Image (tube, grey):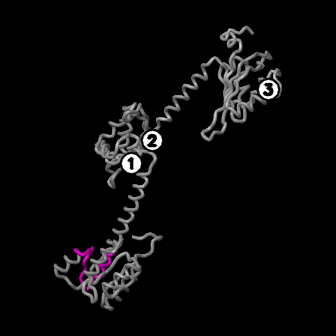
Amino acid sequence: MLTEHQPPPLILVVDDDVFVRGMLQNLLEKQGYRVTTATDGMNALAAIERCHPNLVLMDAVMPVMDGFKACAELQKLPGADIPVIMVTSLDDEPSVNKAFEVGAVEYITKPVHWAVLRHRLAVILQTRYTQAALRKSEARFRGIFEQAAVGIALVNMDGKLIDSNPATQKMLGLDESSLCGKLFHEFFSSIDSTTEKDFYQQLLEDTRDYYQMEKYFFRENSEMLWARLTTSLVRGADNTPQFFVQMIENITEHKRALTSKRLATKVFEKTTDPVIITNAEGNIIDVNQAFLSTTGYNSEEVLGKNPRFLQSGYHDKAFYETMWNTTLKTGSWRDEIYNRRKNGEIFSTWISMSTVQSEHNKVIHYVAVYSDMKVLNEKLGIDK
């Protein structure tokens, strides 16, 4: 019933008969319970506020305040959710009914059958501990459910929403009342329904713990949005499917970033202007095909190196210092520059260099785009 980290339950024995009090205390302590006692209902209420027992064994007939009155007053104490077992010699129906009306959870007549009392005690205390643990678990779940940054939705076996957290409601632009009872699949459209049907069946057959799918959805007055849904199934004690848990992550920005990256990669690969990308230290981490064709190097010869191997000797140290200082200060720099190809040929090119910064405004890359001066001059009508 108890874990090794829990103290033994504290039982309050309330009886005006010193012999009964002593007998119950002795029997209870032999079973490992902690025991405190009171002689009447008034003293019992004081002991309850002072000691906060886990359970009360209450006699019915006592001086000053009887057990019925004490039990009724106990129910009025703030937070005093303490089970009371009425232990009395009264065995008439009105007394039994009155005991339960004032809040007793069990009624045992004297003389006490110790085996019966021991069993009832154990059952009631175990039930209380289980209920307390369940309430704590439910409160913890509700806190996570309500505060989670990702959407969480509970869907019954008919596919209808039975609960949703604020993140889900915000994502879909609907309140809880507008979502409850609606078919979940009507909000999210799958791009691969055949695969999802297979995953769903595997989930029901208990051959898969969960599955993930990317789906698109629409919010009122918005463009198409994207979500990653993780679907799992909650089963009962008999392994019968109970409901689905849907974890919903809005990946719209991630999708847009991937699209932009693919587009940038395509432009990088296909542009006819040479492009160099370096890390913050100025060492080359990528070049495009146009750069290799223009300079005559292959990628193995340039990756990881500083671009200074391109220097022609035409410019002095002050030129390069101005280039780097301006780029760091303003984020970009443009000018004509003379570089040297692998075969030693010197050529003129227009360089546009810029920085790439992190979200914390720290330079993480430099990008240099070279344009052929001959082509630029022809476009500008300059004879040079």
Q: Earlier in the sequence, mark 1 or mark 3?
A: 1
| Rendered residue at 32%/36% (across/down) | 186
Residue 249, label in figure: 2
Q: Quadrant of the N terminus?
A: bottom left
Q: Can you give x and y, in whole percent of width and height, for residue 67 in the image? A: 27, 82
Q: Earlier in the sequence, mark 3 or mark 2?
A: 2
Check disc 2 and give the amino acid type.
Answer: Glu
Could you give the CA–CA distance between mark 2 and mark 1, rounded to whole angstroms? 13 Å
- Please name the residue that numbered disc 1 is placed on: 165
Q: Can you give x and y, in whole percent of width and height, for residue 313 in the image? A: 83, 22
Could you give the CA–CA distance between mark 1 and mark 3, rounded to whole angstroms? 60 Å
Give whichever of 20, 363 is nearer the camera: 363
Check disc 1 and give the amino acid type.
Answer: Asn
317 relative to 369 in the view: left or right: right
Task: Identify the magenta region.
Answer: 101-122
Residue 319, label in figure: 3
| Rendered residue at 68%/32% (across/down) | 330
24 relative to 262 in the view: left or right: left
